[in-house]
Amino acid sequence: MAEHVLESPPQGAAPDWTIPQDWAAYTAEDHETWDILFARQSKQLPDRAAEAFLRGLDVLRLSNPGIPNYDELNERLMRATGWQVVAVPGLVPDDVFFDHLANRRFVAGNFIRRRDQLDYLQEPDVFHDVFGHVPMLADPVFADYMQAYGQGGLRSLGFGSLDKLARLYWYTVEFGLVREGDGIRLFGSGIVSSHGESVFALDDPSPNRIRFDLERVMRTRYRIDDYQQVYFVIDSFEDLLRQTIETDFAPLYERLAGQPDLGPADLAPDDEIITRGTQAYATERAGA
Ligand code: HBI
Ligand code: FE
């Protein structure tokens, strides 16, 4: 990830790396790409996504179809939780990223994927960043969690353990599941913005599903190139927020430094396994 990040803001960007969204520059095809993705996911998610996400989708129901204009979106988001979306040219350095989150600003790319990339791309585009992340930011508890994560990130910059902290973000904000009613629902932005993974993460027998444990998650490597081999299931957003606020990260990092990392498909003795995966999907994709 870090290798794609420039050291200083590119020309035209502010010192905090933000740029104008330049909404008028999107083409008709760009807007149509958003509409196709939006229709597809809003149809698929009602039985799958967390209530908080589905409720939050309303902030995206703007007066015009197409890619949201951040000014209009921000009026709604600001009213809901005091968060804002700001446009950035791509990946920004960790300290800049954390500083925005700590101040309730979510950085979003402003480009949209090409028509031949509807199903998968690695870089976060406006569909991933806005459809995937913004609905959860309209939830008051999750909104506080994201800010707490940014504050924790700023405090952690000196520890040399950002890879561990990034795993917490990955396995919650990006790929988290939550226990809800008598089932499990999606809330991670990488899942809800993916047509394939929003089925796979809940229904496929391949991945492990393990009850969330902060230390366990921070020990677990992740893959960025395919569906996850493990998903962690939080009890509730309140619980996630509480653990993040109450944990003293300094001794945690020290403990983690003395333990080996776990691979994405590994199980650990203390795991509370919700579903033990077959790993059939990952095995097949590896060509074994
Ligand atoms: N920059 N634009 C952007 N989006 C991210 O999600 C992001 C980033 N820079 C750093 C970063 N994430 C991370 O290091 C976090 O995953 C911790
Ligand atoms: Fe994301």
Image: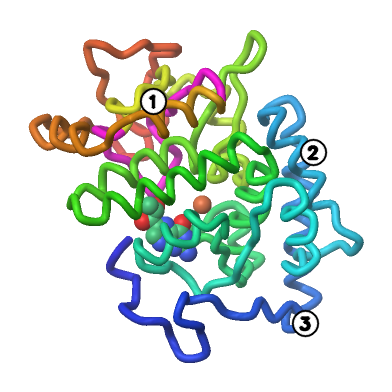
Mark before the other along the chain sequence, 2 or 3 = 3
Residue at the (39%, 25%) spot, across then down: 280
Residue at the (28%, 68%) spot, across then down: 3
Magenta region: 218-236
Residue at the (57%, 79%) spot, across then down: 19
Q: Is residue 230 magenta?
A: yes
Q: Residue 134 — which label?
A: none
Q: Residue 24 — which label?
A: 3
Residue behind mark 2: 43
Position of residue 269 in the picture relative to residue 124 (left or right): left
Q: Residue 180: x percent and y percent?
A: 63, 17
Residue at the (28%, 25%) spot, across then down: 216
Residue behind mark 1: 280
Q: Quadrant of residue 273?
A: top left
Mark before the other along the chain sequence, 1 or 3 = 3
Quarter of the figure that contains the N terminus: bottom left
Label 1 near ligand 2 (CB < 8 Å): no
Mark before the other along the chain sequence, 1 or 2 = 2
At label 1, the amino acid type is Ala
At label 2, the amino acid type is Lys
Quarter of the figure that contains the C terminus: top left
At label 3, the amino acid type is Ala
**Closer to the camera: disc 1 or disc 2?**
2
Ligand 1 shown in quarter: bottom left
Q: Residue 144: x percent and y percent?
A: 56, 41
